[in-house]
């Protein structure tokens, strides 16, 4: 009898928790904003206190990959690794208007090489939100800046196994600071978002580098035909098979004053500070399984991009200036096999033309969605050509298989 009573009590408590979760969903205040690294398909494992004073949601995701690469001038090589391993916590405290998001990374490719005098990059996001209503979101902490579309999207929401070469060089990534978003998305009529950020400009997990330089970022997003289904701008490919054509046009600009690193928020340290300006333009289209994306990214600097070590003139480092275009198209069948093609062009600035090559990259891939982007199998073939200042060129290619799984 005692066992029966205990089981009944347990079932009742589960029922009450479910009712509380459903009730909280009515507030329509789930953390599903583009500033965060996850689209909102799964809810993970959630817990709500009996008095509804706090809510905690736990999610994880993992990317395991195997790659065969053949780079000109090197022996062919095989590589197997856990590319990404992330743990995320989000929810609210006291009131659903006060939210938080924490994301930690553990894979070597995420954390990066440990260097003397530098912090370990385990923390990706640690941010507090105040969301007074569905139109306004104010945040303070470390998270993604309102930059280019592919960077704002979670790496778990990509069609191919990784982002483009231009995203790798020109993105503005994460930073610590304040952000204000004004959101005006409607399903079947013209929609728009305005986003702004004031941040330190030095990237994530920086300490002991206080200076007088800050980064100012602004972004505009336009939806001529209305918002995408289920926040569809936050993941690539038309896995939901939009019933009507949907289009996103967006533009972002950042000025990073007195930046210390080669890519603003990313890269190695410069020998002198530089003020950098970034322009990031995107377009995304989805309809009935078809999807297309186009992006333009550029970075310029106020002075010569090359910096020289004042104590050793033989040592130098440079801001990665230049521009690039990405073009991507795909079709997702009704059985959720997606076929993707991508072409990227990257042109370096004249200041660093003798130091870095122009690059062209071609990628084709097939993805099988088992549970949307949360569980998928990906295969990709990638070929790139590097052209150097002296007229020489290198050709590299790789074949990759990747499994993504998460909740």
Image (tube, grey):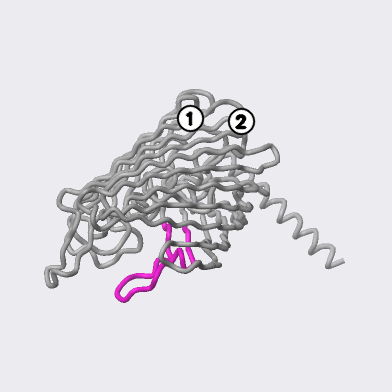
Position in image of residue 58 (x %, y %): 57, 58
Against 166, residue 290 (above or below) is above
Q: Can residue 183 be seen in this view?
A: yes
Q: Which residue: 71% across, 55% down?
A: 14
Q: Mark 1 points at which residue?
A: 247
Question: What residue is shown at x 30% (from left), y 41% (from top)?
Answer: 279
The image shows residue 270, relative to residue 186, as above or below, that is: below
Q: For mark 1, give the secondary structure.
A: strand
**Residue 220's quadrant in the figure?**
top left
**Residue at (33%, 52%) from the top-left corner?**
387
Closer to the camera, 313 or 237?
Answer: 313
Number of numbered labels in the structure image: 2
Residue 135 screen position, x and y as percent: 43, 35
User: At 28% across and 58% down in the image, what residue appears?
Assistant: 202
What is the magenta range? Answer: 102-126
Q: Residue furthest front?
A: 391
| Residue sticking out furthest to the top | 189
From the viewer's perspective, tell me whether residue 261 is left or right of residue 12.
Answer: left
Query: In the rendered structure, does residue 118 fall within the stretch colored magenta?
Result: yes
Say above or below: 185 vs 353: above
On screen, residue 113 versus residue 351, left or right, reads right
Q: In which quarter of the image is the N terminus?
A: bottom right
Instruction: Report if the CB atoms under discs 2 and 1 are less than 8 Å apart.
Output: no
Q: In this view, does 43 lie to the left or right of 117?
A: right
Asked if residue 99 shows in the view, the reply is no
Question: Few, some or many C-alpha atoms within 10 Å of disc 2 (few <14, some 14-19, many ≥20)?
Answer: some
Task: Provide the residue designation for mark 2.
Answer: 288
Residue farthest to the bottom, as pictured: 116
The percent position of residue 397, horizontal first and vertical second, equals 48, 56
Q: How far apart are marks 2 and 1 (CA)?
A: 13 Å
- Residue 293: give its label: none
Instruction: Identify which residue, 132 or 2, lies in the foreground.
Output: 132
């Amino acid at each position: 009898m005692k066992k029966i009573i205990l089981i009944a009590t347990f079932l009742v408590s589960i029922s009450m928790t479910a009712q509380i979760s459903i009730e909280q969903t009515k507030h329509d205040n789930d953390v599903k904003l583009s500033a965060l690294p996850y689209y909102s398909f799964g809810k993970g494992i959630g817990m709500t206190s009996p008095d509804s004073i706090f809510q905690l949601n736990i999610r994880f995701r993992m990317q395991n990959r195997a790659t065969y690469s053949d780079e000109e001038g090197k022996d062919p090589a095989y590589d197997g690794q856990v590319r990404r391993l992330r743990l995320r916590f989000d929810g609210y405290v006291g009131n659903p208007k006060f939210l938080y998001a924490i994301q930690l990374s553990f894979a070597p490719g995420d954390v990066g090489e440990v260097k003397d005098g530098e912090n370990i990059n385990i923390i990706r996001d640690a941010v507090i939100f105040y969301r007074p209503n569905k139109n306004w979101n104010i945040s303070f902490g470390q998270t993604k800046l309102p930059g280019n579309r592919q960077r704002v999207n979670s790496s778990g929401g990509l069609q191919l196994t990784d982002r483009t070469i231009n995203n790798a060089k020109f993105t503005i990534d994460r930073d610590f600071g304040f952000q204000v978003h004004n959101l005006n998305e409607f399903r079947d009529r013209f929609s728009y978002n305005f986003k702004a950020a004031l941040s330190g400009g030095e990237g994530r997990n920086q300490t002991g580098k206080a200076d007088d330089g800050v980064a100012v970022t602004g972004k505009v997003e336009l939806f001529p035909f209305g918002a995408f289904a289920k926040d569809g701008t936050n993941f690539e490919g038309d896995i939901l098979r939009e019933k009507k054509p949907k289009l996103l046009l967006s533009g972002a600009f950042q000025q990073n004053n007195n930046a210390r690193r080669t890519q603003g928020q990313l890269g190695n340290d410069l020998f002198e500070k530089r003020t950098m300006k970034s322009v990031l333009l995107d377009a995304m289209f989805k309809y009935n399984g078809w999807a297309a994306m186009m992006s333009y990214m550029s970075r310029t600097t106020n002075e010569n991009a090359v910096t020289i070590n004042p104590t050793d003139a033989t040592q130098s480092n440079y801001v990665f200036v230049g521009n690039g275009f990405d073009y991507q198209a795909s079709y997702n069948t009704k059985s959720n096999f997606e076929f993707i093609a991508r072409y990227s062009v990257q042109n370096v600035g004249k200041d660093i033309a003798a130091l870095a090559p122009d690059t062209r990259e071609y990628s084709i891939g097939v993805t099988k969605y088992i549970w949307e982007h949360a569980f998928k199998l990906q295969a990709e073939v990638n070929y790139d050509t590097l052209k150097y200042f002296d007229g020489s060129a290198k050709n590299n290619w790789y074949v990759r298989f990747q499994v993504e799984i998460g909740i």
